[in-house]
Amino acid sequence: MQIQRESKIKIAIDNIKFPLLAIVFSFIIGAFFIIWTGNNPGVAYVELFSGSLGTVSRFGETMLKTTPLIFTGLAVGFGYRCGLFNIGVEGQYILGTVFTISAGWIFRDLPGSILPVILLISGALGGAIWAFIPGILKAKRGVNEVIITIMLNYTALYIANYVVRAVLNPSILQGTEKKAYSVMIPEQGRLTMLTEIFPSFGYSSVNTGIFIAIAMAIITWFILFKTTLGYEVRSVGFNPYASEYGGISIAKNITLAMVISGALAGLAGAVMITGLTYKVDMASGMPGYGFDGIAVALVGKNHPIGILASAFLFGILKNGERKMQIAGIPKEVIGIIQSIIIIFIAAEAIGSYWPSIKRKLTGKKDEEVKA
Amino acid sequence: MVIFIALLASALRLATPLIFSALGGIFSERSGVVNIAIEGIMINGAFFAILVTKFTDSPWLGVLAAMVAGALTALLLAVLAIHLRGNQVVAGVAINLFATSITAFLLEMVWKRSGQTDAVAHALTGNPLTFLEKIPVLGELFAGLTPFVYLAFVAVAITYYVIYKTPFGLRIRAVGEHPRAADTVGINVYKIRYICVMISGVLAGISGASLSLGTVSLFREGMTSGKGFIAIAAMIFGKWHPIGAMLASLFFGFAEAVQIQASSLGINNIPSEFLQTLPYIATILVLSGFIGRAVAPKADGIPYEKGHR
Amino acid sequence: MTNVVEMKNITKVFPGVVANDSVNFELRQGEIHVLLGENGAGKTTLMNILYGLYEQTSGDIFINGKLQNIKDPSVAISLGIGMVHQHFMLVEPFTVTENIILGSETTSGFRNTKLDMETATKKVREISEQFGLAVDPNAKIHDISVGMQQRVEILKTLYRGAEILILDEPTAVLTPQEIIELGEILKKLVAQNKSIILITHKLKEVMAMSDRVTVVRRGKVIETLQKEDTNIDELAELMVGRKVNLKVEKDEHEAGEEVLKVHNLQAENNRGTQALKGVDFEVKAGEIFAIAGVDGNGQTELVEVLTGLRKSSGGSFTIKGDDLTKASSKQILKHGLAHIPEDRHKRGLVLEHSLAENGCLGSHLNEPFSKHGLMNDTYIHEYSQKLIEEYDVRTPSEWVPAKSLSGGNQQKFIVAREMNRNPELIIASQPTRGVDVGAIEFIHSKLVEQRDLGKAILLVSLELDEVMALADRIGVIYDGKIVGIINGEDANERELGIMMAGGKAKKA
């Protein structure tokens, strides 16, 4: 039993070693940029963390920023577990918001006891439908999901703009003048602000969405590691040939993993609408949560618990950057740090190729012979 | 007729950055490296073009700076993708994010504000070949062009020549299809891929310059607004062929021009958003084989491992 | 006659394996010299050293009498050595000419930057006429036959001025007609003073094509013979050798009812050509039926079809009377199949999964491994502990990923998992490939144990001694067909070797 626990811990440490190093290095590189701006990196990083964690309401704002990142991180991570690179979380998120707002209008007369649930389910459905397209194309026609999902992101963006402008605009549904945003979801469909329960959250808009996000992380963990579905998804992700050998359908699991991934992305949109914005704005570009989700998932090693932690880190960065800005440090430093983290993660090969580099340096060759 | 000429000029201008970037994508992917970073390289190109123009007052030096910035950004992708055999898509995503942040950072450092730079005094927004404007009717068209538009077509011709008519091009295509075969006849796969990814960066850099120096004379955050991805779409729609990519870019540029000028053209019944989605939906259909069939180079996106097994 | 190639005392050591052990090899000018040996005997390794793909651990290579250091293929090419690899190195969408000139292009025009396809095509035509290798220089590779593709590969070496040609298993992919044509081409080449090394394990071809033969076995050169001085029987014996007899305790056992019945089964390989051309046999409960044969004669496809991993193109098979020809691997597993796959890394294990998770692969949907879609972790771990214990798998615990185990232990774990499925039919495909002697004996004894328990066992093996030691009945597969079925006790190596090589079995 002792040995088992030790080997389990060792595996866990092996997994988080690299992301932690990546984070540390990125902060060090970020420090040089801060010095370039003529500021003290120590001061800047203190501002960053006190700005995001210093008071309860600041902490609340950090949790607010963390909420969508958990969802989109989980979405990317779940796909990755099945060997899928879902760059389309962005678009699935957008579709999630559109479905939520549509449901909000259609079911505007339902009571507060069921409306929020319906809205969340609608959002998840929107994302799932959008993800089904690349899923089925990959499963049945072998089309690479990366390009398809990128293309679907922009398609979703323009569809959303159209819907907001020409279908769900208050000017059409409520006869007001033309707005650059949609109708609002009804009061009883909205999530509760935590400050209503715990006044110490003060000005923070953090809402019960954060609990839904954490719950989804736990559920995702459960699905991945405790159910046959998760077992099959992970098997296909690691080795489709062995999975096929074990009687696991590759096509079914690819489609399913994509749909679940999309549902999580759609849920991100639904929680954003029901918890914070209550409407969808017309947009000229991507909201960015999907791309952030890629970073979150990579740093979190595609493990739901790791994703919780890394989403929190990115939440801190996102919330603290304003405080840094006020202290006179360009907030773009944070973006630079974020991107350098991902560059390091992309270069993780450095780590895994280290043995072969070492071998080259020592002049030994290691080739396995296939008899 | 005047409207139509204006529409055509607008389409050509809008197609120009797409053509450059799509050609860049072709170089990279033909050699076997997926380049999602085109968008980020364009951002860097657009920014450094303005930056250097501001300090030298020479827009052509600005273009040169864009090319260098593009090549260096692409070098980062090349190292990650080729030597470290990292995930090329992750690397691309990271570079896109990096370019967005670093340009915004430098913008703030140099211009002491965020959002957009000041306009540079001398840009490249006018037609360089003024004598063409004397041609009746078509003169109007040429008057609406920029040096970048002409350069784009020159770049198409050169790309076509390099890829299909030179030994280097033959080797690029071989490396992207069957790197091991190339290796066994003594071709250095890594070297070819490095060169191609960097050429890709140069072209995407010029593409960025054509956006900043060639249109509004300034750099604005988010000014690429996904054009890098439309260029990828054009590359796929054009089946990784320079002429095909050019035609696809022109088609997408034309669609955008129509969308922008919809009201003056009297088109009100087609929602503009539908025209905007056209490039993307077309690409999805081509990729999944519903219309035609676009097949990527066989080794596209697959890191090559030297060594002999 | 002068020696164009002399390889002296070549030794190549891979970690844990000596692939070539002080090998001496000579090639005379203008001869066709066959390197004969079983799979894994070290023929290809030796030639990869000559072509600069590997570096020898020790030993010297002389080309035309001069000591050379061939550090990469470009050196080999410049020394006039050309190699036609077993898997062709051709760029499919390219034309024949483009493939031939790749890397050695002819140019013209502005600063010699332009590909000169006209001159190139002309030169290709000239060479192809000179050596009787008719090809269409402008055809695309994916439009021409495999035989044609091979000609292109040969032309590629000739275009680079090769005087010494190495052909690695050139007949493996060819039709009988194409093999005859290849023989004629090779004769034309030596008539023009080229020297040729032919790697093969097919005895018939040796007799048809060679001047001299060097037999390689387990990394060592056994003998070099003039073709005239030898015959198929002798070569078969030299090639297979008198190996250490594997001792397997095996009693007489009555075979029971028929479990697997294969009827006229046909299938295509990945290249889309017919790999199984109508296979018939049956396996009964309580017997080990072995498929013997040289690699690449349809074994892989046969096993894949029987396990639901490949679609058949004709014929049928049944397990205990149920037709499963169109069934998925999941359904076949349900009918009591256990499968020890030939490639444990590709099929047998999810290397990143823990041993516990690998232990339930294929039965993860059955109770008590899972219930209502929930995995029963406690049982899964207990179960894999049991597998590890019973089969003596050396591992710190069942938590470690499968990839951290040695090959032998991985294989033992797979065998453990499959035997514990309580199957009706066990398909064991090269179950001892690449594992150490201890593991081999263990796996063999387990297979016999299962036979004695009344299971039907289909053993597919490239190792003749394994087949001889285990099988109750042996079916020899050649070119996608079972060319003969003999009883285990009646079998002798020579006879089997000849049948495997496509020869006719003499009546004993």
Image (cartoon, rainbow, N blue to C red):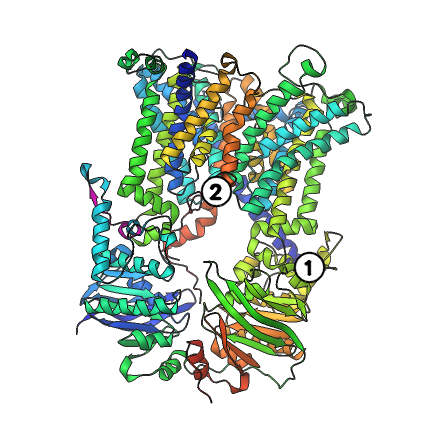
Q: Residue at x 38, y 69 (%)?
A: C176
- Badge 2 crowding class, 10 Å Cα cut-off, few under 14, some 14 to 19, many 20 or more, is many
Q: Is residue B142 magenta?
A: no
Q: Report which residue position mark 2 lands on.
A: B87
Let me know if marks 1 and 2 both belong to one chain. Answer: no
- Spot occupied by residue A262 in the image (x, y as percentages of width and height): 63, 37
Q: Above or below — where is A239 with respect to A168?
A: below
Please name the amino acid that badge 1 sits on: His
Q: Chain of mark 2?
A: B
Residue C72 appears in view = no
Q: Nearer the viewer, mark 1 or mark 2?
A: 2
User: Residue A261 appears at what percent x and percent y?
Assistant: 63, 39
Residue appearing at x 55%, y 39% in the figure: A298
Give me the chain letter of mark 1.
C
Q: Is residue C422 above or below residue B137?
A: below
Report helix, strand or loop for mark 2.
loop
How many angstroms separate mark 1 from mark 2 (CA)?
34 Å
Label 1, secondary structure: give it. helix
Residue A356 locus on image (x, y percent): 42, 52
Tag on residue C381?
Answer: 1
Q: Amino acid at mark 2?
A: Asn
Q: Is residue A144 visible?
A: yes
Number of other residues with Cα within 10 Å of mark 1, as a class: few under 14, some 14 to 19, many 20 or more: many
Quadrant placement of the N terminus of chain C:
bottom left
Residue occupying the far bottom of the picture = C508
Range of residues picked out in magenta: C99-108
